[in-house]
Image (tube, rainbow, N blue to C red):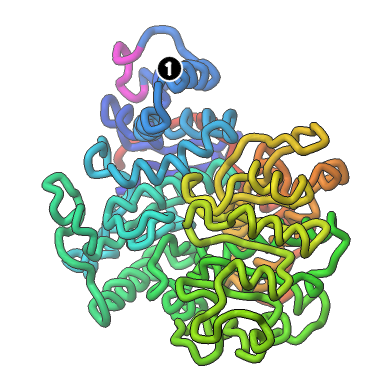
């Protein structure tokens, strides 16, 4: 049974919820609970008289009260737990509060605090959210999807918990990630919370700490592998297609051995994308595009080193290479030669054992033939920066301090405005601190980070904002635009359009200050522009709604939910 239906009165055109619940059952549903903001008429109709304080409150009252509770917490983890408790009792207040204080609360509901929460999730879970799919229950997935009681789901964020942020395999405790990601979809893009669903594919864990933990809530077995793993995923996707055929499925924090194959297998079968690959790549490409404007350079003039060439590194490399190809007309193979990919062994070279997704970025051995480095090993990062003349340095290695002062100083010698992106999350994993980058490059570096850092002081005394290269700039708007325009798939060029739209929002003053992305405070405006760019690109490719720009804009705007209370009418049984 659906928990409610959204309806429109044919006479007055009032939008209202038709609700079959009453009394405590209604108050305990976080999607429907209004707390003491239920009207007097609703209190009578839904058997709430006497169950609430007598005065009828407002959403604003509730937000102010819960913000006071939030501020009284002593730790970030305590604030996270408090916000999740609020979400579990009243989603409207939760999202109104989050929107009002988004920049302050973003590091709490997502990285870095969500990582700490996932590490301890089995020990602090108060209430379960979303759907847990296992090998034992996957054959009943259609029934399970029906049990969530939502009228229609248009967005699903799914993880198997194998690569949670930079923390590794957290099994079902990784559920904190899709829950947090959906909170950001709602806050940033206004996708209605009733049309969203977080999912964990609990296929076991290889984390010995969890397997030995008596309180661990997940399947206490080693991870499924091979055909058994892919059978669970396939059956899950079938269930989604049958139950919610128009839903967007976002793959989140899968291990690299599965992430690329799942993206490739399902990209034409279901509307889907992988934020770790495509979202990270597009956001970094947007910041890179802005940095080039400031530096007065073309992408093809850059020599780019990427440390950490997993799925995120691959996503960034491909996004930059495609941007170079599309905007400068350079053959893709040549674009990739300008990118020096480094992983555990050092610089990735032809003839080395490499993952399939790395092979397009293997450098010919002739590139290092004249370098004064030992030939019995691959060149390390310091050697690549010096001898390849690197001008752009990007970190996705989760190795704190990997960018040394010597490396950064050499980068500053290679370029007048060197570009340095330390994109690893959480903050403790950043390859360098912004203050150290500024010192090593005499304040000339154009900087972006993966996690939030406070404003920094330049040598001339100016205080500047550090651009946070947060996927929040990309995935909410991309998801919203894809859903609204009824796209049949999410293409690489749709991500390129999103990346370009974000960079174009950076103002002349922000460019002058060296800021590479618009302020996160403007995220709703950003999401709207991204959604519109994505929808227009889908239209151009013939895979989205064929309507005018104005019509697309009005549909997107109308779909961006603002937290407020709808009037309720009791769904009397017939």
Give the percent coordinates (x, y) of residue 241.
Answer: 40, 70
The residue lying toward the viewer, choosing from 249 and 205, is: 205
Residue occupying image coordinates x 32% and y 30%? 26
In the picture of the structure, the residue carrying the numbered disc 1 is: 72
Residue occupying image coordinates x 44% and y 80%? 265
Image height check: is 460 above or below 347? above
Quarter of the image holding residue 243? Answer: bottom left
Label 1, secondary structure: give it.
loop
* Magenta-drawn stretch contains 49: yes
Residue occupying image coordinates x 33% and y 53%? 174
Image height check: is 39 above or below 312? above
The residue lying toward the viewer, choosing from 317 and 81, is: 317
Give the percent coordinates (x, y) of residue 502.
Answer: 73, 54
Q: Quadrant of the C terminus?
A: top left
Magenta stretch, residue numbers: 45-52
* Magenta-drawn stretch contains 323: no
Horizontal side of residue 244 vs 327, given as left or right: left
């Amino acid at each position: 049974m659906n928990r409610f239906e959204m309806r429109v009165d044919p006479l007055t055109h009032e939008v209202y919820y038709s609700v079959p619940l009453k009394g405590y059952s209604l108050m305990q549903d976080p999607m429907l609970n209004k707390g003491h903001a239920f009207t007097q008429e609703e209190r009578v109709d839904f058997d709430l008289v006497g169950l609430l304080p007598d005065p009828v409150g407002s959403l604003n009252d509730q937000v102010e009260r819960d913000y006071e509770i939030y501020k009284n917490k002593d730790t970030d983890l305590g604030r996270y737990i408090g916000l999740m408790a609020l979400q579990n009792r009243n989603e409207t207040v939760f999202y109104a509060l989050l929107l009002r204080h988004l920049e302050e609360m973003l590091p709490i509901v997502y990285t870095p605090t969500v990582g700490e929460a996932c590490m301890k999730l089995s020990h602090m879970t108060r209430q379960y959210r979303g759907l847990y799919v296992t090998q034992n229950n996957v054959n009943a997935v259609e029934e399970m999807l029906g049990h969530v009681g939502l009228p229609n789901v248009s967005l699903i964020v799914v993880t198997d918990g194998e690569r949670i942020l930079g923390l590794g395999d957290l099994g079902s405790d990784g559920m904190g990630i899709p829950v947090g990601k959906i909170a950001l979809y709602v806050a940033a893009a206004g996708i209605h919370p009733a049309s969203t669903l977080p999912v964990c594919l609990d296929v076991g864990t290889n984390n010995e700490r969890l397997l030995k933990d008596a309180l661990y809530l997940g399947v206490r077995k080693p991870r499924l592998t091979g055909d058994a793993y892919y059978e669970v995923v396939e059956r899950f996707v079938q269930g989604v297609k049958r139950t919610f055929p128009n839903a967007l499925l976002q793959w989140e924090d899968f291990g690299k051995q599965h992430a690329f194959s799942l993206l490739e297998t399902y990209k034409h079968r279901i509307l889907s994308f992988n934020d770790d690959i495509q979202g990270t790549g597009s956001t970094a490409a947007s910041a890179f595009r802005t940095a080039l404007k400031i530096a007065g350079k073309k992408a093809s003039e850059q020599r780019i080193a990427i440390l950490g060439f997993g799925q995120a590194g691959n996503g960034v490399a491909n996004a930059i290479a495609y941007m170079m190809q599309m905007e400068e007309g350079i053959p893709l193979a040549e674009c990739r030669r300008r990118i020096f990919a480094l992983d555990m062994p050092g610089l990735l070279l032809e003839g080395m054992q490499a993952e399939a997704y790395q092979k397009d970025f293997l450098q010919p051995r002739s590139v290092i033939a004249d370098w004064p480095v030992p030939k019995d090993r691959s060149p390390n990062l310091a050697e690549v920066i010096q001898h390849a003349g690197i001008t752009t340095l990007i970190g996705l290695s989760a190795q704190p301090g990997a960018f040394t002062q010597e490396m950064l100083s050499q980068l500053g010698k290679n370029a007048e405005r060197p570009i340095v992106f330390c994109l690893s999350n959480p903050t403790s994993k950043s390859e360098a601190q912004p203050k150290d980058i500024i010192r090593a490059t005499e304040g000339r570096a154009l900087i972006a980070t993966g996690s939030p850092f406070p404003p920094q002081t330049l040598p001339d005394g100016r205080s500047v904002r550090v651009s946070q290269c947060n996927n929040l700039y990309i995935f909410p708007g991309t998801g919203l635009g894809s859903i609204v325009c009824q796209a049949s798939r999410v293409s690489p060029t749709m991500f390129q359009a999103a990346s370009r739209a974000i960079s174009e929002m950076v103002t002349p003053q922000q460019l002058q200050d060296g800021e590479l992305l618009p302020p996160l405070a403007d995220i709703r405006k950003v999401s709207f522009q991204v959604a519109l760019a994505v929808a227009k690109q889908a239209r151009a490719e013939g895979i989205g709604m064929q309507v005018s720009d104005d019509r697309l804009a009005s549909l997107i705007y109308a779909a961006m939910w603002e937290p407020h209370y709808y009037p309720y009418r009791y769904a009397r049984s017939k």
